Image (cartoon, coloured by chain):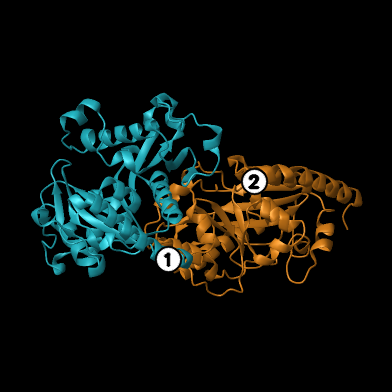
Chain colours: A cyan, B orange
Amino acid sequence: MISGDPVGPGNLAIETAAMRRSDRIVDISSGSLQVRLAESEADIDAVQALRYRIFFETLGARPQIDTARRRRDFDRFDTDCDHLLVLDHCRGPGPEIVVGTYRLIRREASVRLGGFYSAAEYDIAPFVAYPGEILELGRSCVDAAYRQRPAMQLLWAGIAAYVFHYDIALMFGCASLPGTDPDALATPLSYLHHHHLAPPALRARALADRYVDMCRLPAGALDPPRALAALPPLIKGYLRLGGFVGEGAVIDREFNTIDVCIVVKTDLVSDRYSRHYVRRSKDIKETWGRDTWAS
Amino acid sequence: MGSPTLRIARLVLYVVWTLSLMPVQGVGLALRRPWSRTFPGFYHRGCCRIFGFRVRTVGTPTVERPVLFASNHVSYTDITVLGSLIAGSFIAKAEVASWPFFGWLAKLQRTVFVDRRVRSTRSQRDAITERLAVGDALVLFPEGTSGDGNRVLPFKSALFSAAEKMQEILPIVIQPVSIAYTRLDGIPLGRLLRPFFAWYGTAELAPHLWMMIGLGTVEVVVEFHPPVFISDCGSRKSLARYCHARVAGGMAAALAGRPQPVPEPPPTAGVAALAAIPVGRARALLNRPERLSPQQG
C-alpha cells in the first residue's frame, strides 16, 4: 500500500506486514477505534470525503463547482502535509471507516506549501518567529455519531503523540463558531477576548481587511461559566489545554463560520530538544530566507 | 504448612511456562510486533492458572488509551493478577531492573523504571510521560510500596505528576483499581492468613514465594472503579485522594466479603460513568467521604 501503486478505497483496511509493525509515529487503538496518520492516497480521499460530508452537507458550507462535482473537500494544502485519522474498524473497509480527521502542518511542510493555511486570515508572524517546532492544526472534523468521549479523546491522544514525536513547542490554528453574524455570537467572542486573550508575544491579529472586533460586550456583562459551557467542544478542548485566542475574528463566508485564532503552548519540550531547536530554528530561518530569495 | 507436591508441581510448571514464553516475547518486542502488547496478558493468565489464582473482576478496565491505572499494591503476585486483566506496562522502582530473572520479566513487559532518588529532572519529560504520549496503558502503584493487604497506604501524589505534566497537551484518563486477596480454598482469609499473600515489610522474597505456592486456590477480587480526569479532581493531590478513597473503599468491600461482585457493566459503562461526573463533582465527592464507601452488596 505504500508502494506507490494506485489504491482503491476498498483496500483501505488492507495493510502490509511492514505497516502493521508498531513503528508508526501515531498508532493508538481504543476498542474498535484507531488513530494514525494517513498513509496512502486512499486515506486522503477518505479524509476529503468525510470533510465534504460534514462541512458541505451538514454545516451548510457553499461548495465551489469542482468541490460539489467530486464530493470531496480538498485544497492545495492537502497534498503536502500530515493528516490524522480516526478509524472505526466496525465500519468496514470503504472510505466510511474514517470518522474523524485533523490536518497537521509543520514548519517543513509550510515551507514547501509557501506558508500556513491560517495566514490567509491572521498575521501569524509571532508563531513563525517562535523558537522550536510549531504545528498548525486545521480542517478538523468528526462524524456526528462520534462527537463524544472515546473518539474525541483518541483524536487528542493522536495529536499528543504527534506533538511528542516532533517535539512541538507551539500549536495553533483557526477554530470556527457556526454562523456569520458577529453580533449573534457576541457572547462567545467577547468571553474569549476578555478571558483567554493571548499574551502579546503569542498574539496573532486578524488581517486588517478581514478584522472583526471580538470585544463586543463589556467583561462585566458576561457570565463566564455559562459562556464557557456554550462554546463549541473543539474550542473548549483547546482552552482546557491552556490555549489562548488571537486578536479579532474573521468571517469565513464559504464555510458559513466565524473563525478565531487559537494558540497552545505545549511546554513539554525536553531540554535536549530545546537545545536542538535553538540550532534548528537558525537553520529554518536560513531555509526560509533561501526560499523567499528563490521565489 | 502447604503441600510439598503442589509446591514442586507449581514451581516446575511456572519455570517451564515462563522460560518457554520469554524468548517468544523477546522476539516480538525486537520486531515490534503488535501482538507483543497482548502476549504478556496470555502469559499472566497461564500463571494465574498455575498458581491457583481465581480472579474475579468488578467493573471493567477502560479501553481508552492512553490510560493510567492506579492500584493498591499487596504483593509481587499483583503483577500476575493485574497483568492477566490489563494489556499494559507496570511502573516500577529502578532497582527492579537489576533483579535477576524478575528484572528480565519486567523488561519483557516494557516496564517503566522510575528512579525515585532523582528528585526533579530539569526536563518536563520523563519515561512515564513519553509512554503516555504514545498511547500506552500504564499501571501505577501509588502507595510506592506494598501494603499488608488489609488496608491501603496513603497515595504519593508525586507519582501522579506525569499525568499533571501531560495536561499540557492531553488530559489523561486515570482509572483507580483495587486488588484484594479474599479467600483460600473458598474460605475467607483473615488477618492471620493474609501475610501469606501480602508481601511487605522485611519479608524475603524467596521464602515468601516458597510458602505461598504451596497453598491452595486463592480468590482475588479486582475492582475497576469509574475513570476520571485530573481536571475532574482539581489538582494532583486531590486526584491522589480521590483514587485512594475509591481503592480503599473497593478493598474494604472485597475483604468484607461482598457476597457477589456487581454484574459487569457493558464496556462503555466506564465512559458513561465518567461522562456523568461533571467537573467538580469528584471534588464534591471528596468532601463527603461517606459517599465513597460502597453500600451495595
Residue A51 falls in image quadrant = top left
Q: Is residue B253 shown above or below A54? A: below
Is any atom of residue B182 visible in this view?
no
Residue at 38 percent across and 34 percent down: it is: A43
| Eye-nearest disc, 2 or 1 | 1
Name the chain under label 2. B
Secondary structure of the residue carrying numbered label 2:
helix
Residue B30 badge = 2
Residue A191 falls in image quadrant = bottom left
Residue at 36 percent across and 45 percent down: it is: A148
Q: Is residue A87 shown above or below A155? A: above
> Residue B232 appears at what percent x and percent y?
41, 61
Residue at 40 percent across and 39 percent down: it is: A38
Is B95 placed left or right of A30 in the picture?
right
Q: Is residue B107 shown above or below B96? A: above
Q: Residue furthest front?
A: A294
Label 2 to label 1, Cα distance in Å?
30 Å
Residue A236 badge = none
Residue denoted by label 1? A274
Is any atom of residue B183 visible in this view?
yes
